[in-house]
Each structure stands twice: as structure tokens, then as C-alpha cells.
Image (cartoon, rainbow, N blue to C red):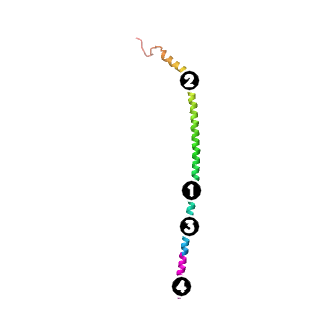
Amino acid sequence: MLQSRGITDLLAAEKKAQELIEEARKRKNKRIKDAQNEAKSEIEQFKGERDQRFKSLEQQQMGNRAQMTEESNKQTQVQIGSLKAEYEATKDNLLERIITLVCDIKPESHINARIE
């Protein structure tokens, strides 16, 4: 009977040890899952911050591009206006000079031409 009681005590102790081990495994798995979920949330938060920062920089650059494009268009219009004004100021003199050069021909013999 003493031997039977000892076996029963050993079986009970083994069962209790198995339960403790199972409980420890469950706690460990729960801690791992909690750590994974916490890491995922931190990663999502970090990605959100980076995305927001990227969008802010992108918006800033797009604003700079629009401003530079507008400034470039203004400068182009100023230059076009300047060229038109210069054209209007000099076109009469230029046409007169071209007509003079074309119409007033002075016949001259070339310096290499020999008169025989």
C-alpha cells in the first residue's frame, strides 16, 4: 500500500508538473503574441510618421515647382515683350538697309578680272 501510495503521489506530482509546464508555455506564447502585436503597432506608427513626412516634403517640393514654373513663365513673357519691342524699334531701319543693299548695285569689276 505504501508503494501504491508512492506511485499515486508520483503520478499526481507528474500531472501537476505537466500542468505547470503547460501553463508556462501558454504564458510564454501569450507574451510572444503581445510582443509581436506591440512591434506591429510600433512599425505601423513609424510608417505612418514617415509617410506623413514624405507627403509633407513632396507637397513642399510640388509647391516649389509650381512657383518656379510660374516665375519662369513670367520671365519668358518679359523676354518676349522685350524682343517684340526691339523688333518694332529696328524693323524699319533694317528693311530700309536691306532694300538699299539689294537695289543699289554698283557695278565693279573684280580685282582679279583682267581687262584685255
Mark 4 and mark 1 residues within 8 Å of each other at the beta carbon = no
Question: On residue 6, which mark appears?
Answer: 4
Disc 2 crowd, CA 10 A, few/some/many (<14, 14-19, 20+): few
Among the two numbered marks 4 and 1 on one chain, the one whose residue lies closer to the N terminus: 4
The residue under the point 57% across, 32% down is: 77
Amino acid type, label 4: Gly
Amino acid type, label 2: Glu
Q: Secondary structure at mark 2?
A: helix
**Residue 90's image quarter?**
top right
- Residue topped by disc 1: 44
Among the two numbered marks 4 and 3 on one chain, the one whose residue lies closer to the N terminus: 4
Question: On residue 30, which mark appears?
Answer: 3
Disc 4 crowd, CA 10 A, few/some/many (<14, 14-19, 20+): few
Q: Find the magenta span and give its range.
A: 1-18
Residue that lies at the very extreme toward the top in this rendered image: 116
Amino acid type, label 1: Glu
Q: Give the CA distance from mark 1 to mark 3.
A: 21 Å
Q: Give the CA distance from mark 2 to mark 4.
A: 121 Å
